[in-house]
Image: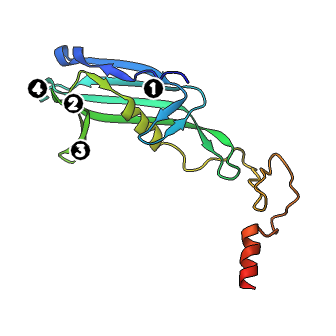
Amino acid sequence: MKEQAIQSINLSRLLREGGSTAAQGEILEYIPLENERILLQGPAHWKVRVARLEGEEGQAFWLSGEIAGYALLECRRCLTPTPAAVRAHFQYMLRYQPGLAHPELVEEDEEEVLLFGHPNLELGPILSEAFALELPYTVLCKEDCKGLCPVCGTNRNEVDCGHDEGSPTRLGRLLGQLMG
């Protein structure tokens, strides 16, 4: 397995001088989430731009970006791994709070603000969340996917197992015996 590249942007210059900066990169193999991974077909490409906002004592920033790639999801009918295009756009108000150990999302004046305490802002959680939120609920490997046989579980796209739609499943036969 390849090592994941670090997704971050250094805001040191912006903290000192103002202006804006940008970063881009790619994520290989999977998008990490807290307790699972979203497998990828090919790399997911990301880019972000951060600009310091005037006023706010030089501590407020606007982050905007996007991430795009192909997630490998299970076909809802036959469970075959199926690529699904995902493109997510995101925006965050950032506020620098020196000494804060980890970025923290808070609500200020009915708006979410991402507080950060280190000039090297880790983007991994932001990118992962944006990508995950844009995943489709279901995918089909093809429009006419035949799915799995309810009797034997065979993928009907690959093999004709000979069972028809009306064939009772093992559970159906068992229930019929119990009821009958």
Which quarter of the figure has residue 7? top left
Q: Which mark is residue 46?
A: 1
C-alpha span from label 1 to label 4:
30 Å
Q: Is residue 30 left or right of residue 159?
A: left
- Quote the CA–CA distance across marks 2 and 3: 22 Å
Instruction: List x then y, in percent, for residue 28.
Output: 53, 25
The mark nearer the N terminus, 1 or 2, is: 1
Specify the amino acid type for callout 3. Glu
Q: CA distance from mark 1 to mark 3?
A: 24 Å
Q: Residue at 13% across / 27% down in the picture?
A: 55
Asked if disc 1 and disc 3 are in contact, CB closer than 8 Å, the reply is no
Picture coordinates of residue 42, whole percent (x, y): 59, 26
Mark closer to the chain start, 3 or 4: 4
Alpha carbons under labels 3 and 4: distance apart: 19 Å
| Residue type at the position of mark 4 | Glu
Please give the residue where the numbered disc 3 appears in the rendered image: 111
Q: Which residue is mark 2?
A: 101
Query: Could you say whether the residue bearing mark 3 is in a helix, strand or loop?
Result: strand
Percent across and percent down for residue 100 are 18, 31
Q: Nearer the viewer, residue 26 or 171?
A: 171
Disc 2 marks a residue whose amino acid type is Ala
Secondary structure of residue under mark 4: helix
Residue at x 41%, y 39% (from the top left corner): 129
Snapshot quadrant of residue 8: top left
Q: Earlier in the sequence, mark 4 or mark 2?
A: 4
Rendered image: mark on residue 57: 4
